[in-house]
Amino acid sequence: MSGIDASLFDLGRLDHLGRQETPLHRLDPRAKILTTAVFLVCVVSFGQYDVAPLLPYAIFPIALASAGRIPFDYLLKKLLIVSPFALLVGIFNPLLDQEPRLQLGSLAVSGGWISFMSILLRFALTVSAALVLIAITRFENLCLGLQRLGVPQVFTLQLLFLYRYLFVLVDESRRLVRARALRSVGARGLGMRVYASLLGHLLLRTLDRARRIHIAMRCRGFSGEIRSLQPLRIGHPEMLFTLGWCGIFMVLRIWNLPQILGDLTLRLVT
């Protein structure tokens, strides 16, 4: 039960972070979505052996997390949870590409290790940017912004319902596990028969809850349109936010800032 409670608390914390009152949270979600999309395109557009040019892009998620009061340990924990997927994608690169591409003193680094590091860095940048976007924007406003940007209504509604129904699903699971624990004092573990029974009851209860939720939504006049108490408006703050960050992304994409700084440092030293 503690694991289910932790999952519910974790979802609730993410939802709570998105409802803070900061200048960054008050920005129109369309500006944040477009800026994050440009960031993702720039990051994934680099070559497979590019590592140093990607490092300056870390300023975007770090700056947004700081301005939006998002705990860095929370983001780091989320990155570590999903990091095995990135490891599985690039773990075989050092074996498939053993041609030396970098010389560090007497140590020759193969292209496989460089591309592996590039995959991990791009993964960390893109996932952290997506997490920060969700953490600084209410999820209903995020879906509304996607819909206003031209994303099909069916997709945005399904995304919103999936997110909201996760809370219901976890809550129903917690009730089932708690009821089972109270009725089996002293029993340890859950056998396959118990798991199957719990899953069956969870399916029936969620279907019944979905039917009641649908009836309640229809009674309240829901017509498939996402509504928000905060009106969407593109103003000067949104323009400055989007154009400023996109300009930074373009500069970092055109010029290799770490290489320029390294060459400048060498010239000053010599």
Image (tube, rainbow, N blue to C red):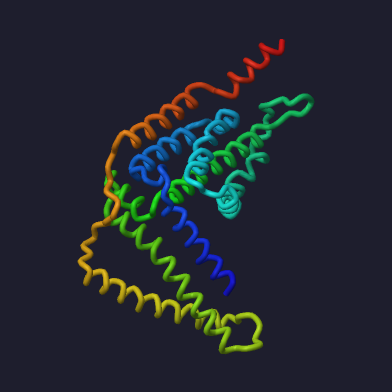
Position of the N terminus by quadrant: bottom right
Q: Residue 131 at x, y = what percent?
A: 48, 49
For the image, the number of numbered tags is: 0
Viewer-proximal residue, 252 or 32? 32
Residue under the point 34% across and 52% down = 141
Q: Which residue extends farthest right?
A: 106
Locate residue 162: give its quadrant. bottom left
Residue under the point 64% across and 80% down = 189
Locate residue 140: give its quadrant. bottom left
Q: Residue 80 at x, y = what percent?
A: 60, 52
Residue 238 seen from this side: yes
Viewer-proximal residue, 268 or 45? 268
Would residue 230 be found to the left or right of residue 7 on screen?
left
Q: Residue 155 at x, y = what percent?
A: 32, 55
Above or below, 200 relative to 94: below
Position of the C terminus by quadrant: top right
Above or below, 179 relative to 63: below
Residue 85 seen from this side: no
Would residue 49 be found to the left or right of residue 238 on screen?
right
Q: Residue 184 at x, y = what percent?
A: 60, 88
Residue under the point 57% across and 52% down = 74
Above or below, 76 relative to 199: above
Residue under the point 38% across and 41% down = 32
